[in-house]
């Protein structure tokens, strides 16, 4: 990453549109870039933007082994509508077998440490393989989503993954803006969203929320809000 870009990143593109952030991020990365997709409405909005702008950006997903059936259905809808190849990454078999034999199927609910250990095996390690060789990656993260994301910038240096560029085109979007775009362009939407799931993750770690609850209340609901990240998006 050029030093000049690194110095500018904290304020770069502060008021830019999602289109501009995507195009500028791709140019700044100056190499292969892919979108990390969990098949949330935000991620599908980004896929639609990429498709509309005809940007040379690939798509990968992490199959943790514990995704909801609706997530797989959404993935197939996206593959068919946009004609894209989804690069799937899986956890290492031996690591999953060792974890479940030693600690059972729900050890992640026993402590924050054990939940992080599960996420490390099922998400963080596969993400590292997915990002190997990339110059940048794209997310559907928004500042509004949680207390752990309020300082997000449109472009960031991802020091946890070799200082590649992290591109957050929807960083300033509100939930209302996301859904307005989804409805206008009739994009494929994960059915879980209509069932009260604002956030999509592994089935045992995600639930529907009640009216008035924070959007991230359905993720790891037994934990404090400041802990509700899986390690994919580590604060700098």
Image (cartoon, grey):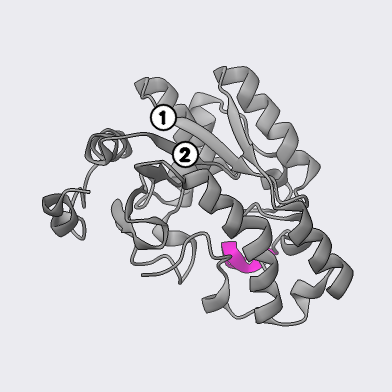
Which SS class for mark 2?
strand
Q: CA distance from mark 1 to mark 2?
A: 7 Å
Q: Is residue 165 left or right of residue 226?
A: left
Reply above or below: 126 against 69: below
Q: How many marks?
A: 2
Q: Which residues are magenta?
A: 210-217
Q: Which mark is residue 57?
A: 1
Reply above or below: 186 against 109: above
Reply above or below: 125 against 1: below
Residue drawn 62% across the image and 56% down it: 123
Pick the front one: 27 or 141: 27
Q: Where is residue 72 drawn, in percent x and y?
A: 73, 36
For the question of whether residue 86 can be seen, the reply is yes
For the stretch drawn in magenta, what is the main secondary structure? loop
Q: Where is residue 48 drawn, in percent x and y?
A: 47, 28
Q: Which residue is mark 2?
A: 35
Q: Where is residue 187 drawn, in percent x and y?
A: 56, 28
């Amino acid at each position: 990453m050029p030093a000049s870009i690194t110095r500018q990143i904290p304020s770069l593109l502060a008021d830019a549109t999602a289109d501009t952030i995507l195009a500028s991020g791709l140019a700044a990365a100056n190499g292969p870039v892919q979108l990390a997709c969990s098949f949330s409405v935000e991620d599908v909005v980004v896929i639609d933007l990429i498709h509309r702008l005809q940007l040379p950006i690939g798509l990968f997903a992490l199959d943790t082994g514990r995704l909801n059936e609706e997530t797989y259905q959404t993935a197939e809808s996206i593959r068919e509508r946009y004609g894209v190849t989804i690069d799937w990454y899986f956890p290492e078999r031996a690591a999953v077998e060792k974890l479940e034999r030693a600690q059972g199927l729900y050890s992640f609910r026993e402590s924050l440490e054990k939940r992080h250990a599960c996420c490390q095996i099922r998400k963080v390690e596969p993400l590292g393989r997915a990002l190997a060789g990339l110059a940048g990656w794209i997310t559907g993260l928004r500042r509004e989503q949680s207390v752990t994301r309020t300082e997000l910038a449109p472009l960031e240096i991802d020091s946890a993954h070799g200082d590649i560029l992290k591109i957050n085109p929807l960083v300033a979007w509100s939930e209302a803006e996301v859904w307005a775009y989804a409805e206008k362009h009739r994009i494929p939407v994960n059915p879980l969203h209509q069932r009260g799931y604002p956030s999509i993750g592994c089935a045992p770690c995600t639930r529907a929320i009640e009216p008035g609850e924070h959007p991230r209340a359905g993720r790891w609901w037994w934990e404090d809000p400041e802990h509700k990240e899986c390690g994919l998006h580590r604060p700098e």
